[in-house]
Image (tube, grey):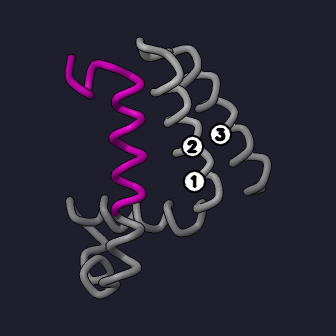
């Protein structure tokens, strides 16, 4: 299965994209700041998410690692429950 059809893999790819974009933006801010719109704007938006929600992104990285390596088969229910928890805490703390 590809990452597009497996929910846990899709979440992992999105999480890695957010972490990578935040790191690249920290090293080379001009590269992402000049491309705020269009297709390249997705990377700028991922960098903003990674910067503003960095404690939650870090926590989600740890949770994904535990879910991935705790059992031989991936646990979609574990990831869905933790994603729901992450979403609820983000809504609670943002407003």
Asked if residue 11 lies in the magenta stretch, the reply is yes
SS for dot 3: helix
Viewer-side residue, 25 vs 87:
25
Q: In which quarter of the image is residue 78?
A: top right
User: Residue 72, percent across and down?
Assistant: 42, 14
Q: Residues within 10 Å of mark 1 (few under 14, many from 20)?
A: some
Distance, label 1 to label 3, CA atoms, is: 11 Å
Distance, label 1 to label 2, CA atoms, is: 6 Å
Horizontal side of residue 9 vs 78, given as left or right: left
User: Residue 2, percent across and down?
Assistant: 20, 23
User: Residue 28, percent across and down?
Assistant: 30, 84
Q: Residues within 10 Å of mark 3 (few under 14, many from 20)?
A: some
Q: In which quarter of the image is residue 30?
A: bottom left
The residue at 79%/47% (across/down) is: 92
Query: Which image quarter holds the C terminus?
Result: bottom right
**Residue at image mark 3:** 86
Horizontal side of residue 18 vs 70, given as left or right: left
If you read the primary sequence from the N terminus, does the residue marked by circle 1 or circle 3 appear first?
A: 1
Q: Identify the disc placed on residue 40.
A: none
User: Residue 13, percent across and down?
Assistant: 33, 40
Q: What stretch is highlighted in magenta?
A: 1-20
Viewer-side residue, 28 vs 89:
28
Viewer-side residue, 71 vs 39:
71
If you read the primary sequence from the N terminus, does the residue marked by circle 2 or circle 3 appear first?
A: 2
**Relative vertical location of residue 59 with respect to residue 3 in this rendering, above or below:** below
The residue at 34%/61% (across/down) is: 20
The residue at 64%/39% (across/down) is: 87
**Residue at image mark 2:** 62
The residue at 42%/46% (across/down) is: 15
**Residue at image mark 1:** 58
Query: Which image quarter holds the N terminus?
Result: top left
SS for dot 1: helix
């Amino acid at each position: 299965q590809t990452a597009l059809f497996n929910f846990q893999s899709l979440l992992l790819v999105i999480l890695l994209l957010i972490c990578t974009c935040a790191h690249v933006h920290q090293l080379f801010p001009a590269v992402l700041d000049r491309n705020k719109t269009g297709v390249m704007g997705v990377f700028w938006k991922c960098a903003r998410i990674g910067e503003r929600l960095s404690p939650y992104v870090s926590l989600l990285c740890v949770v994904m690692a535990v879910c991935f390596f705790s059992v031989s088969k991936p646990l979609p229910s574990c990831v869905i429950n933790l994603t729901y928890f992450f979403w609820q805490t983000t809504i609670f703390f943002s407003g």
